[in-house]
Image: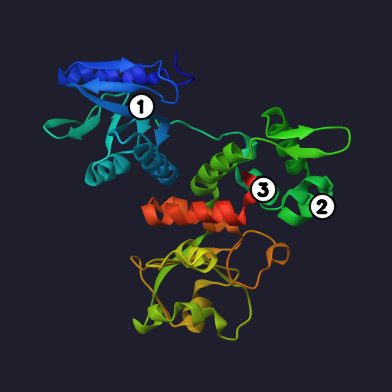
Amino acid sequence: MYRNNDYIYDAVAQLDDLSGIPITIESGRKGYDAILTINKVQFVVISKAEVRAANKGLVYAHIKETSEKTQRPIVVVAKFIASDIAKEFREKGTNYIDVAGNGYIKNDNLVIFITGQRPQTALKTNQARAFQEAGIKLIFNLLSDPKNLTVSYRELAEKTGIAIGSVSNVMKELESSGFILKTNSKRVLKNKPELLKRWLLAYNDVLRPRLVKRRMRFAEKTQYMKWKSVLRISHEGNFLWSGEPAGAILTNYLKPAAFTLYTDKNWQECAKLFNMIPDENGDIEIMTIFWDIENYKNDKQTVPPIIAYTDLINTGLDRNIETANLILENELPNIK
């Protein structure tokens, strides 16, 4: 029996019924969510409660890893897949099924495409206080620096800028959820990879949209060639690269095509200092710094590694995901 993903049966039954093509399920094979056989072709199932913009990067990373491991076609099976993600899946040739019966399966001569079935309401995940704005800020500090587990709630409140009562509530919730082990002498962060995944989803879904200031572009094309020198201009305030530029700086593995810049100044100041122009389709995203900059200073002009990792994963692009995993391995060894 599946662990909390019996919806695989529901999704497959719906697609079987609507398509008229028999689909068999094998659920007992170790290491797989399930194996579907359609017209004698075996598909490895990746099951997700839901797929939407906030977690699509993680889904693409899972697809890539599973495909390389199994060398078999993959199908994503979910309770809910957002319509824009379903469209993106089809454009990328990614097979999927949801419990409403919508699906896209293409492999050699096999083609199934069903759309327009009424989708289920998107799941309200991460509704606990730990994964709302105050909790997201606190967990960021716990994952970024394990020493924060040893300080008082008052110090944590000062570091994160959230109320001491919120600190207490979130810490209790993390403890009851198995993410913090509390002994007589100390606190220990447990299940850190899973906590990072849940934090990433909540950050993308809840906090990050509130941090976006403006999309912009460089006024001169030559500036893209010299992006590394942009922040060396004398200025007041804090300006830190994230996403692809941070990935390039931290790993030397990536040539940035899109730019993410976190700052405590407004976008007008960015435009003036760095010769940028507002553009709704611009490839420079200006974001608000939400953490205490004094606690996470470095000489590389990059955001804390967990932010760079998250912004790279969020793109869903293979090269960015590979770069994010290098950052996780080399810059965040405490999270393994």
User: Which is nearer the N-term, disc 2 or disc 3?
Assistant: 2
As drawn, which residue projects farthest toward the bottom?
234
Where does the C terminus fall, quadrant-wise? top right
Horizontal and vertical percent position of residue 313 = 46, 51
Q: Which mark is residue 120?
A: 1
As drawn, which residue projects farthest toward the right?
184
As drawn, which residue projects farthest toward the top?
1
Three-letter code, disc 2: Glu
The residues bearing labels 2 and 1 have C-alpha atoms spaced at a distance of 43 Å
- What residue appears at the point 65 percent right and 43 percent down from the top-left corner? 135
Frontmost of labels 2 and 3 is 3
The residues bearing labels 1 and 3 have C-alpha atoms spaced at a distance of 38 Å
- What residue appears at the point 69 percent right and 63 percent down from the top-left corner? 296
- Using the image, determine if residue 115 lies above or below residue 228: above
Q: Which mark is residue 334?
A: 3
User: Which is nearer the N-term, disc 2 or disc 1?
Assistant: 1
Q: Secondary structure at mark 1?
A: loop
How many other residues sit within 10 Å of disc 1, few (<14), some (14-19) or many (≥20)? few
Cβ atoms under marks 2 and 1 closer than 8 Å? no
- What residue appears at the point 24 percent right and 30 percent down from the top-left corner? 103
Cβ atoms under marks 2 and 3 closer than 8 Å? no
Image quadrant in which you'd find residue 222:
bottom left
The residues bearing labels 2 and 3 have C-alpha atoms spaced at a distance of 22 Å
Horizontal and vertical percent position of residue 318 = 37, 52
Three-letter code, disc 3: Asn
Q: Is residue 13 visible?
A: no
Where does the N terminus fall, quadrant-wise? top left
Render colour scheme? rainbow
Frontmost of labels 2 and 1 is 2
Q: Is residue 313 visible?
A: yes
- Using the image, determine if residue 309 lies above or below residue 247: above
Residue named by callout 2: 155
